[in-house]
Amino acid sequence: MTSPTPAARPRTTPSLDDQLVLVTGGARGLGAAISEAFLGAGAKVVVNYHRSREAAEQLAARFEDRALPVCADVRDPEQVRDLVAQAESHFGTPITTLVNNALMDFSFNGDARPKADELTAEQLAAQFVGSVQAPVDLIQAVLPSMREARGGRVVNIGTNLFQYPVVPYHDYTAAKAALLSITRTFADDLGPDGINVNMVSGGLLRTTDASAATPDAVFDAIAAGTPLRRVTTPAELADTVLFLASPWARGVTGQNLIVDGGLVKG
């Protein structure tokens, strides 16, 4: 006779203005838009950065006591643990939402990408460390606090390119596809702890540092293929991240919400 499945623990979903949010790569581009969206909603935000100290400090200075810039290379597990400890010690409260946004050393430049006959193991490994291992390390670092709080939110930033490879960025796309798998398996594993794990996948965003190398003709072609006839902005994608961290998304987990103006269906 099999044992009954244990009941899920009661979950708590604080309102956005009661949350402590960690945004990796939160000082520039999409990360800055996400950080600003949470800060605008009243949350406390840890703005993680690697090389963008000035941008992180300028963003934090606009929000006085609710934003903390912290330098850490999220590819280093020890720095990840220190990042979480510093954030929770500074604010005196556990991290309630983790946004895995950091994108390491990548530019959306179709002319410079490795072609199928040029792709190397080193290029694949570099993207897997930044887009798969780093998010796993970060989730593991915040898990004790989220479990103690009986709930939490993880939002991973993905891409629509593995469904619509308008430009075949092989290494980046493969790593993000793996992150979607991690999103869904972790959602199942952590659901009984009251932790929701989701992904938000944008298309090409207009404009971030990573997409600055993209020619206008590519932006225009993508815009023409969407029902909205425009390219999604970082602020629009940030809105969806806020939704997934909010009490209104308490029943949403293991999902990949595509925010690309309707370019990809389903």
Image (tube, rainbow, N blue to C red):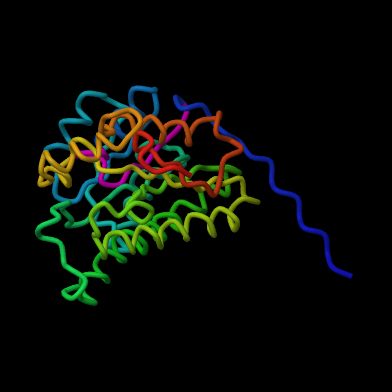
Front residue (pair 194, 142): 194
Q: Give the side of residue 119 with respect to residue 256, left or right.
A: left
Whether the magenta-drawn stretch holds residue 259 is answered as: no
Front residue (pair 15, 261): 261
The quadrant of the picture occupied by the N terminus is bottom right
- Quarter assignment of residue 247: top right
Q: Is residue 56 visible?
A: no
Q: Give the side of residue 190 with respect to residue 35, left or right.
A: right
Point out the stretch of residues depicted in magenta: 18-31
Q: Residue at x 65, y 51 (%)?
A: 192
Identify whether 17 is placed above or below 210.
above
Q: Residue at x 20, y 73 (%)?
A: 119
Q: Give the side of residue 45 with respect to residue 231, left or right.
A: right
Q: Residue at x 36, y 56 (%)?
A: 162
Identify whether 92 is placed above or below 82.
above
Q: Residue at x 19, y 51 (%)?
A: 50
Identify whether 29 is placed above or below 118.
above
Q: Give the side of residue 221 with respect to residue 178, left or right.
A: left
Front residue (pair 213, 195): 213
Q: How many marks?
A: 0
The x and y percentages for residue 6 are 76, 55
The x and y percentages for residue 164 are 34, 51
The x and y percentages for residue 73 are 24, 57
